[in-house]
Image (cartoon, coloured by chain):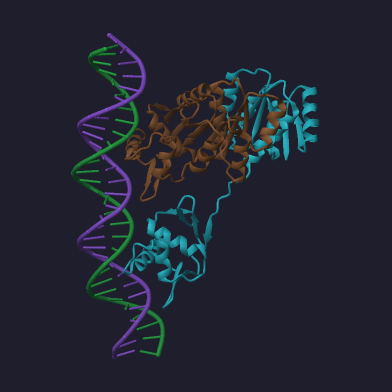
Chain colours: A brown, B cyan, C purple, D green
Amino acid sequence: MRVLIVEDDDILRDGLKVGLALAGFTTDAVATRESADAALAAGSFDAVVLDLMLPDGSGTDVLKKLRDARDDTPVLLLTARDTVADRVSGLDMGADDYLGKPFDLDEVAARLRALARRSVGRSTALIEWASIRLDPARQSVEKSGTPVRLSRREYAVLQALMSQPGAIFSKTTLEDKLYGWQEEVESNAVEVHIHHLRNKLGPGLIETVRGIGYRLGGDN
Amino acid sequence: MRVLIVEDDDILRDGLKVGLALAGFTTDAVATRESADAALAAGSFDAVVLDLMLPDGSGTDVLKKLRDARDDTPVLLLTARDTVADRVSGLDMGADDYLGKPFDLDEVAARLRALARRSVGRSTALIEWASIRLDPARQSVEKSGTPVRLSRREYAVLQALMSQPGAIFSKTTLEDKLYGWQEEVESNAVEVHIHHLRNKLGPGLIETVRGIGYRLGGDN
DNA sequence: CGCTACCTTAAGGCTGCCTTAAGGGACGTG
DNA sequence: CACGTCCCTTAAGGCAGCCTTAAGGTAGCG
């Protein structure tokens, strides 16, 4: 779950970055309209947290540009001006949700989870596949009812795979979901995490599609 | 856009009905949990506006029942208790959005539009021919419903053939689809892959057109 | 009957993945 | 502040599966 944060206030931006990281999101943060456009054009995000007031323009411009490019990435608007008219116009402009400042970090995280969930066409908050159950809100995983301790990276890999059971994720795609720009990885880290996941969750769950990537498959 | 309103307060319910009608929605309104369950089981709605406090139970029960039935209809929760904890739990329970009372009708309408917008789309482009089904998104192939494991090259050959069922593909054309311009192949690799495909998918599917190439043909 | 195009099979090489282990950083604890 | 723990990354070696190649066999076509 990779999220782009667009917020010019340094303190708020860092707060969001830290808070969402704690909630299990991978984050990239920018402060200007221009860099937001660039980031959105370059990387693929699962959601965007977008401040309306930016130094070099309005967040609505970013939103409009995104939608004009037929990009459906869920967008959560943040704004100080919290009037109903603002909300309505923001939502009708293509935003998916709206929060007025001051906001609560837990609520931002919950709304992002709801948006991401809906964007892949799923309704329930729990994700289940074979004997595995994953709870995004609690960042917890169970196998056949017994809890399994996963590290953060392991959890992130599993969540990505379970977001679309059966779909194939290339190693590059998984890296994109695990790491922001800063922290680029130049190795087989994903392979190692997959290996640890297989140890903890049993064989047969994560299939290798040689030359292409990984996916959830079979059962057991 | 057909919306189900679940709200026990008569005044609020009528207000929602009128307001949403003015905003262009078709509405059905019920007042109890039981009738909400019945309405959801019977009709198909594009969205649900759901009050949490109902005379004969909680709105969360309705929500849970809906999601357990694998119904993805977007749900907008309404509630008087507007604490952050409530919102977070509501969203993580499978609701798509959340509004505290008092709310503004325009905002309800805008949020419903945002929900409905997101819930459409997502079509899978399967290619089918005879008893073979190919899913480009998953890079998977089924024969008569049972999955068939193909290697990357084999899959590439089959996808090429199925992209235009019945059309003839020369070996050169197929090679072009399999290999970049860099890596030239000087052998009968394509023939071998065709052979493996026939083994896995059965005879009769891939026809040889002597001197010209291959194509999908016949059936079975 | 000979030629050509294609089929079939098997073997070798190579790419990509798995596995393991070591080093370093973050975090908590004494 | 030092120490221990956990986790994450990096790197190296080994293994397996796939792809290609090549050689011999078979069917179509004159």
Tell whether A4 sits left or right of B64: left
The quadrant of the image that shows the C terminus of chain A is top left
Locate residue B115: give its quadrant. Answer: top right
B21 up-or-down from B140: above or below: above
| Numbered marks: total | 0
Residue A216 visible in the current orientation: no
Tell whether B62 sits left or right of A110: right
Q: Nearer the viewer, residue B142 or A87?
A: A87
B123 up-or-down from B90: above or below: below
Locate residue A89: give its quadrant. Answer: top right
Which residue is drawn at the image coordinates 76% and 34% (left, top)? B28
Which residue is drawn at the image coordinates 50% and 33% (left, top)? A3
Q: Position of residue B75 (x, y in %)?
A: 65, 32
Q: Nearer the viewer, residue A7 or B198?
A: A7
Tell whether B21 sits left or right of B58: right
Residue A82 visible in the current orientation: yes
Q: Nearer the viewer, residue A168 or A185?
A: A185
Q: Position of residue A55 (x, y in %)?
A: 58, 30
Which residue is drawn at the image coordinates 58% and 27% (left, top)? B91
Locate residue A125: give its quadrant. Answer: top right
Q: Position of residue B209 (x, y in %)?
A: 44, 75
Q: Position of residue A6 (x, y in %)?
A: 54, 31
